[in-house]
Image (cartoon, rainbow, N blue to C red):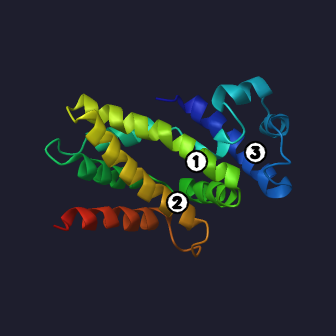
Amino acid sequence: MPTPRTLRTRARILDAALDLFDRQGYDATTVNQIADAAGITPMTFFRHFPTKDAVLVTDPYDPLIAEAVGAQPAGLPPLERTRLGLLAALGDITPTEDATARRRVALVARSSSLRAAVSCGTEATQEAIVDRLVADGVDPLDAAIAVSACLAATTTALLAWSSAPDDVTLAQLVRRALAQLALAGATP
């Protein structure tokens, strides 16, 4: 679990990066510029983010999401446990986090290379959730299939959010996407 200091530094880096990306564009902004704007060294930047694109496509929430999935009743099918866990984790998103996420998503949606990086960033989330389900006795393949389906729906909602009206929240779109999976599971 990240320390409060780590979270504050990550937030400062993210804010500086988003401001620079908005003003200069993603491609024209360097890690050195981000570090300078955040009041840190490039080495400190790389301690928090392995690459420039990681600023936009990673977050520290994977353990919390995996915990939310693990808190769902073990008797449920893996897809439903994952779906309900993701919905539970959504309830913890603050309006400030929602606004920051919207800025990140808008930048990602405009860049094909960043959209590809989202897939890589999703792998860490998938691994954390699959590990949690497997630790609870779920077959690894069943866990991977369930988590992949839920994260694909969530990612689709996330990228659609960039062009949604301002009053639409990420939680609303993710709930809608995950509801489709619930409906699919209810069909004989």
Q: Residues within 10 Å of mark 2 (few under 14, many from 20)?
A: many
Marks 1/2: CA–CA distance: 10 Å
What's under tag 1, amino acid-wise? Val
Q: Residues within 10 Å of mark 3 (few under 14, many from 20)?
A: some
Q: Nearer the viewer, mark 1 or mark 3?
A: 1
Q: Nearer the viewer, mark 3 or mark 2?
A: 2
| Residue at the spot 59% in from the left edge and 73% down from the top edge | 166
What's under tag 2, amino acid-wise? Leu
**Which element carries disc 3, helix, strand or loop?**
helix
Q: Position of residue 139 (x, y in %)?
A: 23, 35
* Mark 1 lies on residue: 118
**1 or 3: tag closer to the N-terminus:** 3
Q: Is residue 188 left or right of residue 67?
A: left
Q: Position of residue 47 (x, y in %)?
A: 66, 25
Q: Are marks 3 and 2 in contact (CB under 8 Å)?
A: no
Q: Which mark is residue 158?
A: 2
* Mark 3 lies on residue: 16
Marks 1/3: CA–CA distance: 20 Å
Q: Are marks 1 and 2 in contact (CB under 8 Å)?
A: yes
